[in-house]
Amino acid sequence: MEAGLSVQAVKQLGKELLVSKTHINNAPTLLSLLSKALDSPASSDDECVLHALLHLQAFFSPLLSSGELSLQAFEKAQRTLETKAGEHAHQAQAVYLAWLWNKYNQFVDLLLRIVVSPTMSSSTQIVAMDALMGFVREEKQGDFSGRLYNKLFSTLVLSKHFKSQMIEHLVANYFKYMDVSCHTCVSLRKVITCHGPNHQGVSTSLEDGSMVEETSLQSLMSNVSDILICINVPKITGKDSENAVIESWSTTKEKAVDVKSKQADTKYAIKQVKFTQKVKKLKSKISRVWLTFLQLPLTTVVYEKVLGHMHKAIIPNLTNPLLLSDFLTNSYNKGGLISVMALSGLFSLITEYGLEYPEFYNKLYALLEPSMFIAKYRARFFELLDLSLKSPLIPSYLAAAFAKKLGRMALKSPPAGALIVITIVHNLLRRHPSINCLVHQNYEISEPQPPDLGETGLDNKNLAAANGEETQNKQFTSEGLGQDPFNVVEPDPAKSNALKSSLWEMDTLRHHYSPVVSRFVASLEADLTLRAKTTELNVKDFSSGSYATIFAEEVKRRMKSVPLSFYKSVPTMLFPKALDSESPGLIDFPGWSFSRRHKQDSNDAKQSTGKNDSTDESKCWMWCKGEPPPMVDERSVHASV
């Protein structure tokens, strides 16, 4: 009958089921329709599936809320049937309740299959999810049904057809409730424990024994991380945190009353738990599931995802964030992108929770490479770098070493990277006046002295060095002024000799090919002169720059004088020749011709003529011909004026 049911027929079956128990057999018909829609989705109608689902939910929901249909009622009916004693009416009622509980479980299993089915529409899946969450609240008459919720989350996480839309729907509508967040942590921890690294293939089955999902350990870790990142401590609904009411999904059907009026109610006073106690309980569960999850062999993608959300979604929700210190320090020591991403969480532990990590600045110094200017998380990295160097307790040698290495990186960076370096160096000079000597370093110049020959006839300086004696010369000779004492390859900032150097890199950037960089250096030079009237710069304003942003800014600028070049015809080559013989050469460079000679031809010309130069134009290759250049060893530019 159900194979060819129309939408109107499904609606009629649902209405009859809700009106009278005499049409109780309509429930198996609607369940069969849902089952066939899952088995053969090509022949199913989404509207029929949706109406069947809604009518079955409307049928089972009042039975659960009233307590007529429950696990306790089913167990009592089972005992009645096993004893085979009592009145015939009790036996019939027990058979009915057992049959009804069986149909309810069939409906729950079908809803779970719909939620993870790749063929069902998103709207139908959301309705199925809402129906399951409604049963979670009603199955135990006001208490949260952990049994059903664990089943729901196991199905979601272990599904190879995991959809982010389902998690987004849960987060937006249910994760704001304290009990939902707590049971989510419990369910996920059970899944991680049961399907950990010892299970390369993970599968689950419903009560009827049918396999509905299969997933790998990598997919499991990805699914769990997506859910864990979304779990946060719910916000309070009252103004006073001690007497605030934390909403629970299992009690949201109760009528909302003002907090002060509720306190007069004895029953409410017994049920009410202080906000701080509930938060501690939730944070404890979040901490346990995170510590269990981080013990898994995380893939690179999951590793980066976890580190990217560490400082915002993980650390604030733990009871003791210092438990993550080993994980973060190991990540920080790995190098590369992982170290950059671990910097954010490690910095939070150091500044907010008192973690002692003496090697922090040495590791941070080692991360300064030109590749950081094109890294994925460069904006966050340079913001944290600026924050890390903000403390006035940083020694001068350390601030000078960072300023010098950043300046050296700026010489190899794109224009956007140079802007970031100039900003950070500017802030360092303002925060640490002790390194202002880098702006202008005075050296004592001495003329080179003749070697001091002793009685042995050897240079006494070389002789002392041979004997192991240290010789120090604090003066620079005129020949050594071009050498920078700063050692950029030294991993220890204390041994880099940064304070003996100067920020000549910043002066070099004044002549940068990009006018944006050169103008920025000139403007900051005035800022350092007028410290009282200027402030520190925000690295965030420059950390997201690129060639595209610089080009966009240049396009927006209004030019006072626009350079123009007029051509009688459209140019077909880069350096076109002049057509008239009176002005030989190139159009844009009248009187000049650019040529390249082959070395062998030049040598032949030298041997034949005895001259050092040859003006045979037949042996010249002109740039404007558009031909590939031959092997060239000499270049010459001839003026044919």
Image (spheres, rainbow, N blue to C red):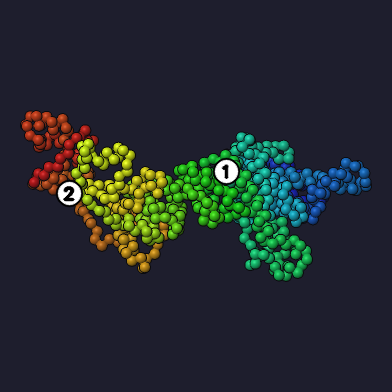
550 or 338: nearer the eye?
A: 338
Residue 595: give its label.
none
The part of the image, by quadrant, that contains residue 255 is bottom right
Amino acid bearing label 1:
Ser
Rate crowding at label 1 as few (under 14), some (14 to 19) or many (20 or more) other CA atoms within 10 Å: many
> Residue 601 at x, y = what percent?
14, 31
The part of the image, by quadrant, that contains residue 190 is top right
Q: Is residue 39 visible?
A: no
Helix, strand or loop status at disc 1 = helix
Q: Nearer the viewer, mark 2 or mark 1?
A: 1
316 or 433: nearer the eye?
A: 433
Answer left or right for 337 relative to 459.
right
The residue that appears at 40% across and 62% down in the rendered structure is: 536
| In the rendered image, the vertical position of residue 631 relative to residue 286, given as above or below | above
Residue 222: give its label.
1
Helix, strand or loop status at disc 2 = loop
Amino acid bearing label 2:
Asp
Rate crowding at label 2 as few (under 14), some (14 to 19) or many (20 or more) other CA atoms within 10 Å: few
